[in-house]
Amino acid sequence: MSNNYPLIAPSLLSADFSRLKEEVQAVETAGADLLHLDVMDGVYVPNITFGPLVISALRPHTKLPFDVHLMIVQPERYIGHFAQAGADWICIHAEATPHLHRGVSAIKELGKKAGVSLNPHTPLEVLDYILEELDFVLIMSVNPGFGGQRFISQTLRKIERLKRTLVQRSLPVLVEVDGGINEETAAQVISAGADILVAGTAVFGKKDYAQAISALRSPK
């Protein structure tokens, strides 16, 4: 993984599911820093994707860190399963559990990077008493559940405010942004303070993955 921010995390949700191994290897070769895996249960979000078995099957085929985004209810029940399957970064939604600190602690105890995700409408205040425990915060810039949605511009203020808070409190927490990322919005979220960009169709929807990743990392 490079140390040059922003880091680019192609989202497997937009890959060709009939050839996942090849897609994962292709974005690694193209210069991706992380692989973003959206786990959806059809309850917390209105879509169903994949679980630990798919992650476990892909793990031997790439050295990329797996950034596993749990869009599921009661995520603390499944953290161990995803860690065992090969997740390196695990993110849970603040809205999906009444025991956020317990979930974050479970991730850390397993030796994984811990993150919390916030939906577009969720205020940053829910993180006030847990920011010190986190490795990253994932700001959703679309409503979670489906790829290919339009970027919600109001989230730029949230990214800016979060970054400002992290700097003021001297916390080494990375800011990840997911939803509607393309060359135009990439420039906006980088300017707002994003460290990691999750991109689905902006990478997997292009013929040249390396060119797509480069364009997101250094948008014009």
Image: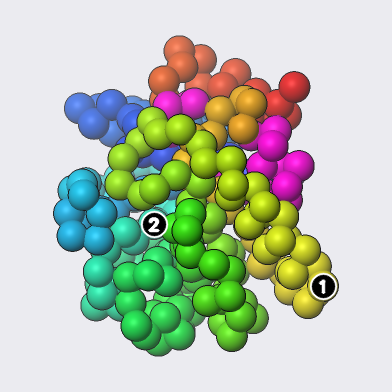
Q: Whole-percent x and y of residue 4?
A: 74, 44
Left/right of residue 39 with respect to residue 168 in the rendered view: left
Q: Earlier in the sequence, mark 1 or mark 2?
A: 2
Residue drawn 42% across and 39% down? 11
Q: Mark 2: which amino acid?
A: His
- Apparent side of residue 41 relative to residue 64 in the rendered image (left or right): left
The x, y position of residue 10, in whole percent, is 47, 37
Which residue bears the numbered disc 2? Answer: 69
Q: Is residue 220 above or below residue 134?
A: above
Q: Nearer the viewer, residue 93 or 30?
A: 93
* Mark 1 residue element: helix
Asked if disc 1 and disc 2 are in contact, CB closer than 8 Å, the reply is no
Q: Is residue 200 above or below residue 36?
A: above
Magenta region? 186-203
- Residue 123, image quadrant: bottom right
Residue drawn at point x = 58 percent, y = 49 percent: 155
Foreground of the two, 99 or 57: 99
Marks 1, 2: nearer the viewer: 1
Q: Position of residue 53 (x, y in %)?
A: 19, 54
**Residue 63 visible (yes or no):** no
Label ID, residue 194:
none
In whole angstroms, how far apart are the C-alphas of marks 1 and 2?
A: 27 Å
**Residue type at numbered disc 1:** Gln
The residue at which mark 1 appears reads as 168
